[in-house]
Amino acid sequence: MNEEAVVNERNPHSGSAFQGVRAIDYTVIFVRDMAAMRRFYEDILGFPLLRELSPGWIEYRVGDNTLALARPSLTAADVPTPNGSASLQLAFKVSAREVDQCADELVRQGVNLLAPPTDQVFGHRTLFFRDPDGNLLEVFADI
């Protein structure tokens, strides 16, 4: 059985209007500490600032995508994720050589690695660490 057949069997909504979605345009991280998160994404990761729509909405360009840091508004009444718990995982794809370079740079900047660069059996070289709000970040490469 081919992969497409398996996907179609598992996807009863194959006629859904959402089949037109081709990419994630932007990702929003709801932040607890905007100042710490800005320092991390701008100064540690070096993501270029795209625009600042307000003090509560900051956008960065990451490849073809936009990564936004935002203070919650529509979800402001939600129970916050407990400190020390990740709300999301972001995975950034680079070359295998760059995984090690990113690890070295993070260590130089004082960021604790959750796992050093590791070759995984599923064909990725991975590096894991957290941002100031506790979100799980991964830098990986196909190997």
Image (cartoon, grey):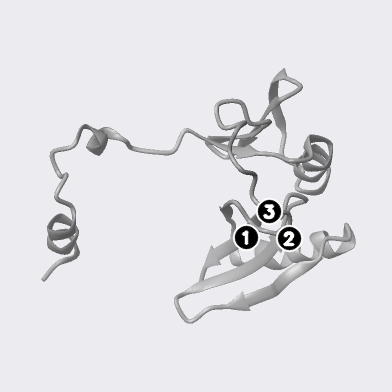
Q: Residue at x 60, y 32 (%)?
A: 77
Give neighbour class at mark 3: few <14, some 14-19, many 20+ (Cα, 10 Å).
few
Say which amino acid is labelled 2.
Cys
Q: At which x and y percent is residue 75?
A: 56, 32
Residue lying furthest top: 53
Q: Mark 1 and mark 3 in contact (Cβ < 8 Å)? A: no
In terms of secondary structure, where does tag 2 sit? Answer: helix
- In this rendering, the answer to whether 99 lies above or below 12 is below
Q: Is residue 134 left or right of residue 8?
A: right
Q: Name the residue at 44% across, 38% down.
A: 24
Query: Label 1 amino acid?
Result: Val
Q: Which residue is mark 2?
A: 102
Pointer 3 or 2: first along the chain: 3
Q: Which residue corresponds to mark 3?
A: 82
- Mark 3 to mark 1: distance in Å? 24 Å
**Disc 1 vs disc 2: Cβ atoms closer than 8 Å?**
yes
Rendering quarter of residue 33: top right
Tell which of 85 and 39 is nearer to you. Answer: 85
Q: Position of residue 17 (x, y in %)?
A: 21, 32
Mark 1 vs mark 2: which is more N-terminal? 2
Element carrying mark 1? strand
Where is mark 1, residue-wise? 139
Taking depth in this image into account, of 106 and 101 the one nearest to the observer is 106
Q: Quadrant of residue 20?
A: top left
Q: Is residue 109 above or below residue 29?
A: below
In this rendering, which labeled residue sits more in front, label 3 or label 2?
A: 3
Answer with mark 3 or mark 1, whichever residue precedes in sequence. Answer: 3
Q: Residues within 10 Å of mark 2 (few under 14, many from 20)?
A: some
Q: Is residue 2 left or right of residue 29?
A: left
Task: Name the spot of residue 51 as percent of width and height, x first.
Answer: 69, 22
Residue 1 % position (x, y): 11, 71
